[in-house]
Amino acid sequence: MWSSLVLALCAVGLLLVVPLLVLQGFLASFPVFGTSSHAGDGYLTWAAWLGAGLPLVGVVVAATTRRRGWTWFFGICVALAVAVAGLNWADHVRHAPPEPPGPRHCVERSGGGTDCPGG
């Protein structure tokens, strides 16, 4: 009985609440009257946490209660969440700022020390 309730709540949360939070975050992120706004960040953060957490809870409950259909459903949702997180991570890695270059010429320091490239 409890497992059916948990699986139903996870499915409803995943299929209705998460998309609603994404939509609210998207709409709240539009600038109003030319001002920059990050008002939708909270909605999107909650959507990300619920979008990853609900399938994890669902797959654990479904697998422990031996419900194959629900296990497949939540397992596919977990795989999609991992794929989206991986793409987001790869995008951040690709757009990371380059490291600052080192000195390209000798810089003499007081006391006789120098910082020379390659030396």
Image: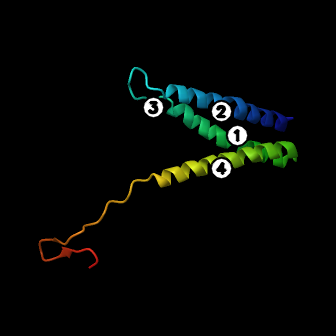
Looking at the image, tell me whether mark 4 or mark 2 is earlier in sequence order.
Answer: 2
> Would you name the residue on which mark 1 appears?
54
Mark 3 or mark 1, earlier in chain = 3
Q: Is residue 99 left or right of residue 40?
A: left
Q: Are marks 3 and 1 in contact (CB under 8 Å)?
A: no
Q: Distance of mark 3 from mark 1, alpha carbons?
A: 25 Å
Mark-to-mark CA distance, 1 and 4: 13 Å
- In the image, taking residue 111 as reference, residue 9 lies left or right, namely right
Counting from the top left corner in percent of width and height, residue 64 is at 83, 48
Q: Nearer the viewer, residue 3 or 36?
A: 36
Bin the neighbour count of mark 4 within 10 Å (Cα to Cα): few under 14, some 14-19, many 20 and up: few
List the residue tagged with mark 2. 18
Q: Amino acid at mark 4?
A: Val
Q: CA distance from mark 3 to mark 2?
A: 19 Å
Q: How is the image coloured?
A: rainbow
The amino acid marked with disc number 2 is: Val
Q: Which residue is mark 4?
A: 82
Q: Quadrant of the N terminus?
A: top right
First of labels 4, 3 by sequence position = 3
At 64% from the left and 38% from the top, the residue drawn is: 50
Disc 1 versus disc 2: distance between alpha carbons?
A: 10 Å
Residue located beneath label 3 in the image: 38
- Callout 3 touching callout 2 (CB < 8 Å): no
**Quick one: SS at disc 3?**
loop
Tell whether label 2 touches label 1 (CB within 8 Å): yes
Q: Does residue 48 sit above or below 29 in this rendering? A: below
Residue sitting at 58 percent across and 50 percent down? 87
Q: Quadrant of residue 31?
A: top left
